[in-house]
Amino acid sequence: EAVDLGPYQHYMQKEIFEQPRAIGDTLANITQFGPELFGAKPADWNAFDQILILACGTSYYSACVAKYWLEEIAGIPTQVEIASEYRYRKTVSLPNTLVIVVSQSGETADTLAALRHAKSLGHLFTLAICNVASSAMVRETDWHFLTKAGTEIGVASTKAFTTQLLALYILTLSIAKRAGKLDPDQEKKLLRELRHLPKALHSVLALEPQIIAWSEAFAKCENALFLGRGMHYPIALEGALKLKEISYIHAEAYPAGELKHGPLALVTDKMPVVTIAPKDELLEKLKSNMQEVKARGGMLYVFADHDTDIVNTDGIHVIRLPEHYGNLSPILHVVPLQLLAYHTACARGTDVDKPRNLAKSVTVE
Ligand code: G6P
């Protein structure tokens, strides 16, 4: 661990602030979408017609976001499965499936075993999205895409997660292109949007002082609920995971539409409810879910986009992200959740970089 902390208090904070660099590096040299970015030949690339993604932990949540992108943008049927479940389950395997493993380390025991299991079932195409070039998963797959997060030391994954999302978005566009869903003008526009990401991330990171103010209230709580809809539901899951991992606050995430099916019973004036509320086609639905929380005295902490009409009132606290991000929104909206978990943990005085009972890489079952 010879990496210099610079002006930061912990590796996790340093790694959160490294995200503009990590995303920029992962994007470097990409001038078009397509199979070559994954080391694949066009003929093989055209041969799969569905996707199965296997992963654990935070990497699993990046795969859950990708399912929304792959089905909505590329129109390819996609399943996502927790590796430790898949490896022991009798599945119906279809050889023409692209099996993807997503892993920061490339060594997680269950993900590696799930990959080997998928291969043993006769799957013909395998791809690793990984942060470590020399890892077992990169060696054991046909194709790979390397994220350029650099060494991640904090046990709670941050920059590896956002670079995985970027890789999976690039994969989505590469498959959309294969399906004839991307003309050259659209491709250029999408590349321009991607190149703007580091700058957009810097502006989101500048919200840190507002998030520190919120973290003081969170530090006093023992429970928190996270809500999101659509591709931001997995972002809610990731926000809850970050908070529980490092602050030891019990946190749960729900797709907001499920509120009435259970979690609403938990809402009191002691329950902070973090809501990921970008301006998308689900926002009006989400706002009615927020009203349900407010009516029960819950304290809403809302991350919205700059042009939102959600305002700070009694019981509703709002932080506006500086832009409106479209399909890239999960990559931006997870950052304030990382900062919220980080500063809440600092306020509670936990060992942020080495939370109790957890390991950076789980290489035994
Ligand atoms: C551990 C780490 C997490 C990570 C997960 C999967 O639980 O603490 O941060 O998301 O393993 O690791 P991988 O290396 O496969 O992404």
Image (spheres, helix red, strand yellow):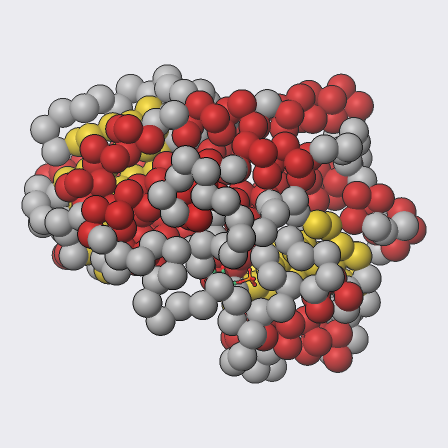
Q: Is residue 127 above or below residue 172?
A: below
Residue 72 is left or right of residue 315, and the answer is: right
Foreground: 65 or 238? 238
Foreground: 58 or 182? 58
Q: Is residue 277 above or below residue 347?
A: above
Q: Quadrant of residue 217?
A: top left
Residue at image location 10% in from the left, 28% down from the top: 314
Residue 74 is left or right of residue 103, and the answer is: right
Q: Position of residue 299 (x, y in %)?
A: 15, 40
Q: Quadrant of residue 262?
A: bottom left
Q: Is residue 74 something that shows in the picture?
A: no
Q: Position of residue 148 (x, y in %)?
A: 65, 44
Q: Is residue 104 above or below residue 278?
A: below
Residue at image location 67% in from the left, 57% down from the top: 132
Q: Position of residue 17 (x, y in %)?
A: 46, 36
Residue at image location 64% in from the left, 25% down from the top: 195
Q: Quadrant of residue 97?
A: bottom right
> Number of marks in the image?
0
Residue at image location 37% in from the left, 19% down from the top: 306
Q: Is residue 85 something that shows in the picture?
A: yes
Foreground: 191 or 230? 191
Residue 16 is left or right of residue 224, and the answer is: right
Q: Position of residue 93 (x, y in %)?
A: 70, 73
